[in-house]
Amino acid sequence: MNQPTELISHSPATGVEIGRYPNTSEATVHELVARAGAASHQWRAIGYKGRKTILKAWAHYLAEHIDELAGLVSLETGKPISDAALEVAVGIDHLAWAARHAHRYLRKSHRAPGLFMANMSTHVEYHPLGVIGVIGPWNYPVFTPMGSIAYALAAGNAVVFKPSEYTPGVGHWLGESFNIVAPQANIFFVATGGPETGAALTKSAVNKIAFTGSSATGKKIAATCAENLTPVLMECGGTDPAIIDRDCDLARAAEAVLWGAMANAGQTCVGIERVYVHEEIATRFTEIIADLAKELIVGHDYGAATMPKQLSVIDAHIKDAVRLGGKFVVGSAESVQPPFVLPTIMVDVPEESLAVAEETFGPTLTIRAVSSMGEAINLANASKYGLGASVWSKRNGKAIASHLHCGMVSVNSVLSFTATPTLPYGGVKQSGYGRIHGQEGLREFAYAKSIVATRFNNPLNFATFKRTAGVDQFIKRLIRILNR
Ligand code: NAD
């Protein structure tokens, strides 16, 4: 079947058409990657300083046009405009950080040559990979792909970005804005389109794919990339836990956990989906968070579900929880009211239920009382996902955080790691691998090249067929002395 040539973007809240964008064909994707590959040498040649100037100019442009971009994000995703502006602001902060720090973390670094190679000078250089294919989701259409785009560009790569089919307008806008500030052409392409356009990018001549999206799609992409050994960075889903100890500030914990669970209609990869709370404070915590949840105004505090098909997933998770004995503290079996989902909090939901074990991606939360923090840690770690977590305790927060098997933890806060450009961001297990943000995020888009150069000739020449018995004896004696 022929792919439609156009992609139509709709408002999830009203269904009204927002815009039409090309549904980029496989042939065009391959052509864009080739053009980006050819231009990438020019981008590399201007060096860190040259790229910093252009990326800072882009950050400035985005900051000056934050209302326009946030308006588009709000229109395409259905999120409140203030949330959209916050998302854009954090995305700009990452762009500026990557621009300012790429040289510091990717510059040549000298290494010790070691005793055997004492006559050598040794150093490591970081080189850009070439062209990075970035595939993004719709839930944070600026912040999420920017974690790859900004860091990849700052490291000296060209980028071809395939935004989600639900947010093509935001992707298109980002591409246009870069080209307004960058004198070089063909460095940052945006290829709007559906999953087929993404699949075409994974089969193209890109040097790496940076994917953010569901774990199910991530597995398909990893399989395709395996055919050419194209490296992949995987930022996938999660079912993030909040662990609440009895010595925490209960009111703050309830307020923040509610926001972490329900903001953006729960469509946050690092959104809180399950709470493990100490049994001594469980009733009080549940009462406070339930009272706060009942005050939320749907359509004002959070918007419509961006992706209509997610509504049936959320509904199935709620019904499965009910079937397995879960009880509503807030909401009901009719919480899904298209295009919205009402705040839903449940207790007595077994760990094997879909609501706890799988990513719900809606404004829902399960709360379970535990007898100790050890039990909370074990339950948190039992998930097949391991993206983020939130821990609430005055005394033991950092210790609990250290025991969690996941990529990021906020102690006495939620989601704070997202807005901290110095910190690497990513998951373990089925939440993915590789890191965006921070120095690790810059190095994700570079390869290390080791260079060993002879400073003076070693009288004990190892690398020759003429190696003497005396040299052999010396090697054995030296390694024994070093390992006594
Ligand atoms: P998705 O997996 O449906 O789609 C993501 C992107 O992949 C889209 O651009 C889509 O067109 C593309 N795609 C789909 N099939 C493809 C294929 N076969 N080959 C190549 N590309 C393909 O995810 P979504 O619904 O857009 O986003 C929500 C998911 O993203 C959630 O699971 C959420 O947890 C996750 N997410 C993770 C992070 C993170 O940083 N870990 C951040 C945001 C969202």
Image (cartoon, rainbow, N blue to C red):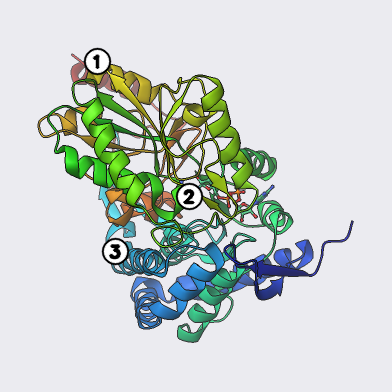
Mark 1, Cα crowd under 10 Å, few <14 / some 14-19 / many 20+, is: few
Q: Nearer the viewer, residue 7 or 279?
A: 279
Mark 3, Cα crowd under 10 Å, few <14 / some 14-19 / many 20+, is: some
Whether the residue under disc 2 has CB within 8 Å of ligand 1: yes
Q: Nearer the viewer, mark 1 or mark 3?
A: 1
The image quarter in which residue 160 lies: bottom right
In the rendered structure, are the residues bearing label 1 and label 3 in contact, judged by CB atoms less than 8 Å apart?
no
- SS class, disc 1: loop
The residue under label 3 is 101
What distance separates the C-alpha of mark 1 from that of mark 3? 45 Å
Task: Residue 73 in the image: state x and y as whole percent.
Answer: 49, 69
The residue under label 1 is 371
- SS class, disc 2: loop
What distance separates the C-alpha of mark 1 from that of mark 2? 30 Å
Q: Nearer the viewer, residue 136 or 264?
A: 264
Q: Does residue 390 lie above or below 351 as drawn? A: below
Task: Residue 254 in the image: state x and y as whole percent.
Answer: 25, 41
The residue under label 2 is 267
